[in-house]
Amino acid sequence: MPSMDLVPILTQKFETFLIITMRVGGIFFTSAFFGNRLFPIRAKAALTLFVAILILPIVPLPKEPYSGNLIGILLTCVSEISFGVIIGFSSLLLFIGIQMAGEIIGFQMGFSIVNVIDPMSQSQVSTIAEFKFIIATLIYLAINGHHFLLSGIVQSFQLIPPGEASLPSAMGEAMTRMCVDVFVIAMKISAPAMITLFLTSVALGIIARTVPQMNVFIVGFPLGIGVGFLILATGISYFGNIFAKLLSSTEQNILDLIMLGRH
């Protein structure tokens, strides 16, 4: 008889573990760094299972079963995956904004035709955009940004037990605002280079008017590249502090999203 009493408990444990895995997997497969395509899928799956096993003992079992049928459990899993994907993707938006800033700077420097394959998105991006993305990733690891993601996963289960995540319309509105902030981040980061390169172009235009014999196109192209690299080299020492502040804002946005997912 005691063994019969263990069956419901083990069933609830398995259902809880499955639902935890869905949310954690949704976060890992779409988040910054862990969601990178260079991060092997098997490693992501193993990390997902490992984190789910660590979280399982600290998550209380539900007072009632998640659902009495398979369809109900599947719907709960879909809801948890969707919630995890939203949280993971929101952590990636900062890097998208930084990469977009690199695209803008590269275009202004004349690097729009000098592209490389981004291993993250498998699409062509400018070399400056990829450079910015790599620097941001290195800073992210250096300041233990990935530790916040792991602690955020634990916090999400403390605030929202497994199977209780919801996707209200307010969460969609918050995600829309965060997507708009991507453009704001891109403009803020690229503004110094854009202004400097614009003033350089204006100066070249004035020189071309006063010295018609000079070929502006021959002089302007290498000058724009040189000025652009000078701005990048000058600003790289400040980029770490800027990134840390933006990451702190992103972390707060993620916590706000988690709070919106509560019933």
Image: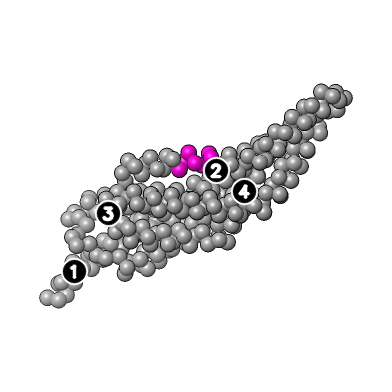
> At x 49% / y 56%, what residue is drawn?
34
Cα separation between marks 1 and 3: 23 Å
Q: Secondary structure at mark 3?
A: loop
N-terminal-most mark, 2 or 3: 3
Specify start and end residues of the magenta stretch as a single range: 178-186
N-terminal-most mark, 1 or 2: 1
N-terminal-most mark, 1 or 3: 1
Cα separation between marks 2 and 3: 33 Å
For the residue pair 74 and 156, the one nearer the viewer reads as 156
Q: Which residue is mark 3?
A: 164
Q: Amino acid at mark 3?
A: Glu
Q: Report the coloring of the rendering.
A: one colour
- Prevalent SS, magenta region: helix
Find residue 126 and report its horizontal and vertical position in percent: 63, 42
N-terminal-most mark, 4 or 2: 4
Left or right: residue 127 compared with residue 19: right
Cα separation between marks 1 and 2: 52 Å
For the residue pair 88 and 9, the one nearer the viewer reads as 88
User: Cβ–Cβ below 8 Å for labels 1 and 4?
Assistant: no
Q: Which residue is mark 4?
A: 132
Q: Is residue 196 magenta?
A: no
Q: Report the mark closest to the observer, 1 or 2.
A: 2
Q: Amino acid at mark 2?
A: Ile
Q: Which quarter of the image is occupied by the N terminus?
A: bottom left
Q: Which residue is mark 2?
A: 185
User: Cβ–Cβ below 8 Å for labels 3 and 4?
Assistant: no
Residue furthest out toward the left: 1
Number of numbered callouts drawn: 4
Q: Secondary structure at mark 4?
A: helix
